[in-house]
Image (cartoon, rainbow, N blue to C red):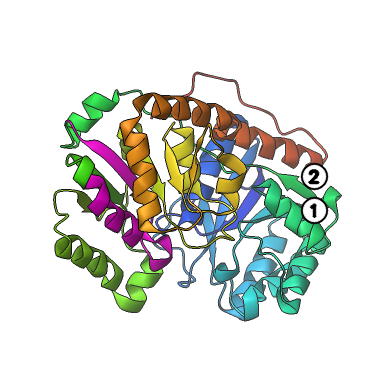
Amino acid sequence: MTTYLHQSKILFLSTFPPSKCGIASFTQDLVNAINREIKSDILINICALDKKDTLPGYKFPVSMVMDAFQLDSCIDTATAINKDAAIELVCIEHEFGLYGGELGDYLLAFLTMLEKPFIIRFHTVLPVPEQKRLKIVQLISTLAEKVIVMTTNSARLLIEDYQISPEKIIIIPHGTHANSQVSAMELKNRYALKNKLVLTTFGLLSPNKGIEKGILAMKEIRLQFPHAIYIVLGQTHPNLLQQEGEKYRNYLQQLIDENHLEKNVRLVNEYVPTKKLMEYLALTDIYLFTSKDPNQAVSGTFLYAMSAGCVIISNPFVLAKEMLDEKTGIIIESGKEHELAKSAIHLLKNRSVRKKMRYYAFLKTRDTVWNIVAGKHVELFNNILGRPVKKAKKFAQPVI
C-alpha cells in the first residue's frame, strides 16, 4: 500500500466498504464528499473496523484495520496511530454494536491510549440511559474535542439525559445524494414497472425493519389499485445472515405466497449501488418506512427518500417526528398494516397531494446534500486544527 510521508492526515475510524452496513456506506459517502471540498494538502485515511484484523480485501483510503472486539487490537491500533506523526485528527463513528466489551467499552481503552485529538459522531443516542451507558457516553464526550449528532433530538438528549455541555455538541445532518435526472416514466419502463403505482422500501433486511407490515398492507391496497406494487430493495443484513441465514427473507416470501401477492410485491435481493438506488427513488410514488424502533435517531434510507422528493409514510421515530408534518409526509402512530394501507390508498387517490408533498419534502432537505454536510465538517476541522484546511476549486457537481 502506498505510504504518504509528508502529508497531514485525518483518520476516520469506522466500518468501510466492502463491509456492507449503513455506517460503512455513510463514511464512504462522507469521505468522498470531503475530498471534493478540500485540496490535497490533507489526506483522508480510514481505519476500518473489522473482526478480521488484516488489510487484505481493503483498498485506499483504508490504511489500517482494527478488530474492535479484541482489546489488544484496540490498544495496538491506538499505539500505531500515535506513532504516525502525520495524523492530526481522528474522526470516530460510534454505534454501541461496533465495539467490543460491555456496551462497547473497549472503545474507552482505545481512547485512553490515544494521544491525538478526536471528534466522535454518535449515530444513536438513547433516552433515559442506564448507569453504565450514561458513564460511557459521558467519558467519551469528556475526552472528545467535539461530539457530532445528526438530529436536534439527539443533541437535546445528550444535554438533558447525559448532562453533556452544549458547547461540546455540534449538529451536522446525515448527507443525501444528488437526484436522478431521468424521468419517472422512463425509469419505470427501464425496471419493468410500466403503468405501475410503485411503493418502495430499501436497506439491509432484518426483522426490526418491519417489512411484513408493508407486505400485509398490500392486501388492502391492491383491492383498489390492482396495478400497485411494493418493491423491497436490499440484501439481508450480513450479521443476521451469519446468525440465521435467510430465515427472515423466507418468512417475507411466505407471506407474499400465502396472500397471493406475487404480482404486487417484489423482493430485490441486491445491495443496490447509489445510482440505481436514486433511480428507484425517482420512480417511487410512495416510500414506506416501517422500522419498529421508536428511538432510532437517524436513518440514511429515510433521508435519501425524502431528499429525492418521495412521499413518505412512516412509523413514528425520532427523525420522522423532526422532518414530517402535514406538508411533507404522514406518520402512522399505531404502526398497523390497516393504517398503513389506509394512508397509502388516500395518497394514491390524490395525485395533487402527492405532488405537493414531494415539493415540500425536497425543500426541507436542501441543507442535507453531501457537499453542504462536507463543508460543515471542513469548518469543524479548521476550528480543531487551528488553521484553515484549503478548499478545492469548485466545479460542477456530477449528477449520478
Rendered view: 398 above or below 127: above
Read off the residue under disc 2: 384
Q: Where is residue 106 in the image (x, y as percent from the top left)?
A: 65, 76
Q: Which residue shows up at 35% across the image and 27% down it?
A: 351
Q: Nearer the viewer, residue 279 or 194?
A: 194
Q: In which quarter of the image is residue 338?
A: bottom left
Which amino acid, mark 1? Glu
The residues colored magenta run: 195-222
The disc, 1 or 2, on the residue closer to the chain's N-terminal end is: 1
Percent position of residue 75, x then y:
66, 74
The foreground one among 305 and 357 is 357
Residue of label 1: 145
Q: What's under tag 2, amino acid-wise?
A: Ile
Image coordinates for residue 293, horizontal then vertical, percent = 52, 62
- Mark 2 element type: helix
**Residue at the image point whose x is 32% and y is 61% from the top:** 212
The residue shown at (49%, 67%) is 50
| Tag 1 near tag 2, CB within 8 Å | yes
Q: Is residue 397 left or right of residue 274?
A: right
Left or right of 26 on screen, residue 289: left
Q: Is residue 54 magenta?
A: no
Q: Callout 1 environment at 10 Å: few (<14), some (14 to 19), or many (20+)?
A: some
> Which residue is at the front of the view, 228 or 140?
228
Q: Distance between the residues labelled 1 and 2?
A: 7 Å
Viewer can see residue 286: yes
In this orientation, does residue 89 appear?
Answer: no
